[in-house]
Amino acid sequence: MRGISIRIWAGVASAAWLAVAVPRAAGQVTPALHSLASDPVLVGAGDIADCTTTTDTATAALLDQIDGTVIAAGDNAYLTGSATDYAGCYEPTWGRHKRRTRPVPGNHEYFSPAAAPYYAYFGTHAGPAGRGYYSYDLGAWHIVAINSDEGTGTAAGSTQEQWLRADLAANRTQCTLAYWHHPRFSSGLHQNDARMRDIWQALNDFGADVVVTGHDHDYEEFSRQTADGVLDANGIRQFVVGTGGTTLRPFGVIQPNSATRNSDTHGVLKLTLHPASFDWTFVPVAGGTFTDSDSRDCVGTAPPAIGGRGFALGTGAAGDEMAWTTGTAQSGYVVARVTPAGTSFLPAGGVLPAAATSYTDLTAVPGQFSCYVLVPFAATGILRTSDVLCSVPDTASGIAGPQHTAIQLNQSNMTTLAWTPPGGQTGYTVFTIPLNGAPSGSFTLAAPLRRTMHDTGGVPTCYVVAAMSGAAIAGTSDVLCAMPGSR
């Protein structure tokens, strides 16, 4: 990688400079990173790592081939969720996807006092320590992780239920998904869990669309229904996906509204989250023949998301490439570019149309630290801004380095990096460069991976992805940076 010097100037993440006239006219739009920005994926299962089986290895192999955020829906490490179970059973399988995993605890986690090994293993990815519930945004969707353990309050008026209602009120998106361990409805061994009724009701009151659970070791899809099990086109669709690796079990009493069931195939549920709809596919392990897939619109009552969510930035041969999820409220876009030389709006002298989902800055100066903000606007003015993402274009080694590396900041402090493997690499090293003066760091990834997540801790951070050939660096990506909290 060519030598570079990054200078950070005061106020780079400030939006104050956006209060200027928006230019008029059409500009160039080029297809770029659309799939990264517009179609985020949530993939996972519950009841996972069990050292007495090999099917957890098989489901982990599925994750190797599926980009996206991974959910571990409880009972993640058998038998007791101990530090030994996580180190010896989970880490060698699903553990290689730990950096992109957002878990919830199950009852087996609490076989260890206070589920302490679970919280120690996942760290900040499991939300506030010891609490077990948290939320984040993924593209245009709001995602809620719930702690359904028997020792955690889930009834109306409990701390968690009150938190959930406040969180949903503060995050009114058209599409909402929640996941936890114990299913409200199930035809499996454990049957329906009445304790989750009030959590379901809170989600239903705010127009949530999907619930994903585990606990029963099978796969089951339910039609949309209310918290009391009444079919309702505006209710919530639930998936039980206890197929992550441990031994499967036969069904018991089949519950009303059960639409699809299987109890002999391990696999993972892949959800593709579009701005106003979702696709689902149950992906079986190698040799499995059962699958389940379909698409549905969201029923959330909030207005459609304003354009600019899911903003992603990458570097290409022609310049800095941007992509995003479009919305319906905007009449057009401009891209604000901030450099040490000042602020300018792109495209020069024009605007991007309301349907635009990508743009390439053909005038990015090689080696110059450049930050970008996507600005959707309407007749009333600026609607909202994207996060601030930055690049130092033309800094890659150019020799056997990851191609088309892109960065996205779509889960509060969580950065997502994606790239195209150059071929011949044995693995990757991702270098992290905090911009607050803290020491730089690095972490390694296995060769099959081409996507990772990193918790910035709220600190502006730059990244370089290096392809490894044994212990040597074969090539690097350009420098890409994320400015959390800048929206």
Image (spheres, rainbow, N blue to C red):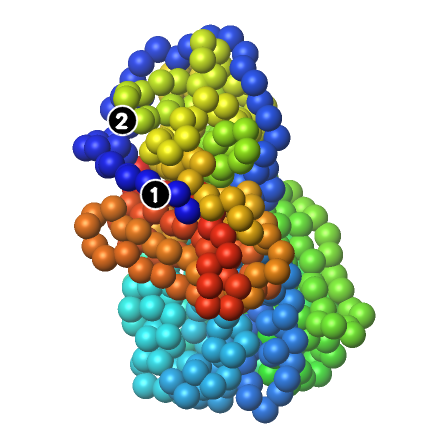
Percent x, y of residue 96 = 50, 70
118 or 236, nearer to the observer: 118
Depth order, front residue of 361/60: 361
The answer to which of marks 1 and 2 sits earlier in the sequence is: 1
Per the model, the C-alpha gap separating discs 1 and 2 is: 18 Å
Picture residue at 60% right of the left edge, 72% below the top: 60
Rendered location of residue 437, percent (x, y): 19, 50
Is label 1 in contact with label 2 (beta carbons under 8 Å)? no
- Residue at the spot of label 2: 340
In the rendered image, the vertical position of residue 291 relative to residue 170, given as above or below:
below
Q: From the image, tell me which residue sits under label 1.
A: 3
* Circle 1: residue type: Gly
| Disc 2 residue type (three-letter) | Pro
Residue positioned 56% across, 56% down in the render = 450
Q: Position of residue 395 (x, y in %)?
A: 42, 40
Please tell me whether mark 1 sits on a helix, a strand or a loop. Answer: loop
Residue 280 placement, left or right of 211: right
Q: Tell me the residue at 51%/8% (across/down).
A: 25
